[in-house]
Image (spheres, helix red, strand yellow):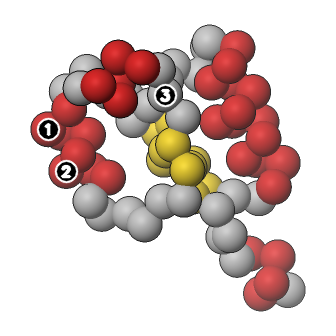
Amino acid sequence: MDALLKVVEVMVAPLPLYHIFSFTVCCMAMMNTGSQSILITNPRDVPAMAKELSQFRFTAMSGLNTLFVA
């Protein structure tokens, strides 16, 4: 039973889930694999996002070029 509850992947989701790419990758794919998603509600506030992400060891992050440049 414990093996079913183990989180293998942790993905950062800084995109709105109403967008089809984010919904598919960050929500549906991660839920399908039983992994954890970290939802960033305001990715434009880069210092706050960095502070939030420093609390987690994540394995993947989706995003747009403008987010990665920031």
Q: Residues within 10 Å of mark 2 (few under 14, many from 20)?
A: few
Image mark count: 3
Q: Which residue is mark 2?
A: 51
Mark 2 element type: helix
Q: Position of residue 22 (x, y in %)?
A: 63, 24
Q: Do the numbered discs 1 and 2 sit on residues whose CB atoms are within 8 Å?
A: yes
Mark 3 element type: loop
Task: Calculate the distance from the C-alpha at mark 1 to the C-alpha at mark 3.
Answer: 16 Å
Left or right: residue 6 compared with residue 4: left
Q: Amino acid at mark 1?
A: Pro
Q: Which residue is mark 3?
A: 63
What's the residue at 51%, 43% (across, down)? Answer: 61
* Label ID, residue 47: 1
Image position of 36 with respect to 16: above or below:
below
Q: Nearer the viewer, mark 3 or mark 2?
A: 3
Q: Do the numbered discs 3 and 2 sit on residues whose CB atoms are within 8 Å?
A: no
Q: Position of residue 37 (x, y in %)?
A: 57, 48
Task: Calculate the distance from the C-alpha at mark 3 to the C-alpha at mark 2.
Answer: 17 Å
Quadrant containing the C terminus in the rendered view? top left
Q: Tell me which corner region of the image, top left, top right, bottom left or bottom right, holds residue 68.
A: top left
Residue that protrudes farthest toward the top in the picture:
19
Q: Amino acid at mark 3?
A: Gly
What's the residue at 64%, 62% (across, down)? Answer: 9
Q: Position of residue 13 (x, y in %)?
A: 51, 36
Q: Do the numbered discs 1 and 3 sit on residues whose CB atoms are within 8 Å?
A: no
Q: Is residue 46 visible?
A: yes
Q: Amino acid at mark 2?
A: Lys
